Image (tube, rainbow, N blue to C red):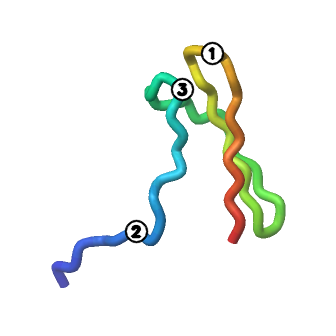
């Protein structure tokens, strides 16, 4: 089978306010919710991404 993988949603890896990639810090899960924490290395701001299933 030569099918190419497809994704149903875009990546949720956040960019900094200046458009640079952020640094992954950690992940936590609470039941059907996953929390991802990233660091904007330019400003030191921590960014939280919530993903629910």
Disc tally is 3
Describe residue 3's horizontal placement relative to residue 40 as left or right: left
Mark sitting on residue 17: 3
The answer to whether the residues at label 2 and label 3 have Cβ atoms under 8 Å apart is no
The answer to whether the residues at label 3 and label 1 have Cβ atoms under 8 Å apart is yes
Residue at point 53%, 28% (across, down): 16
Residue 16 versus residue 7 in the image, above or below: above
Residue at point 63%, 27% (across, down): 39
Instruction: Please state, as top left, top right, bottom left or bottom right, where the N terminus lies in the image.
Output: bottom left
Determine whether the residue tagged by mark 2 lies in a helix, strand or loop.
Answer: loop
Return the residue nearer the eye: 13 or 19. 19
Determine whether the residue tagged by mark 3 lies in a helix, strand or loop.
Answer: loop
Mark sitting on residue 32: none
The Cα atoms of the two marked residues, 1 and 2, are separated by 31 Å
Q: Residues within 10 Å of mark 3 (few under 14, many from 20)?
A: few
x and y percentages locating residue 20 in the rendered image: 44, 26
Q: Which residue is identified by label 1?
A: 43
The Cα atoms of the two marked residues, 3 and 1, are separated by 9 Å
Describe residue 4's horizontal placement relative to residue 31 as left or right: left
Residue 16 versus residue 4 in the image, above or below: above
x and y percentages locating residue 53 in the rendered image: 69, 71
Mark positioned earlier in the residue sequence (3 or 1): 3
Q: Nearer the viewer, mark 2 or mark 3?
A: 3
Q: Which residue is identified by label 2?
A: 7
């Amino acid at each position: 089978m030569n099918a190419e993988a497809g994704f149903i949603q875009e990546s949720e890896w956040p960019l900094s306010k200046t458009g640079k990639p952020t640094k992954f810090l950690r992940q936590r899960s609470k039941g059907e919710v996953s929390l991802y924490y990233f660091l904007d290395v330019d400003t030191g701001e921590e960014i939280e991404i919530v993903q629910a299933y």
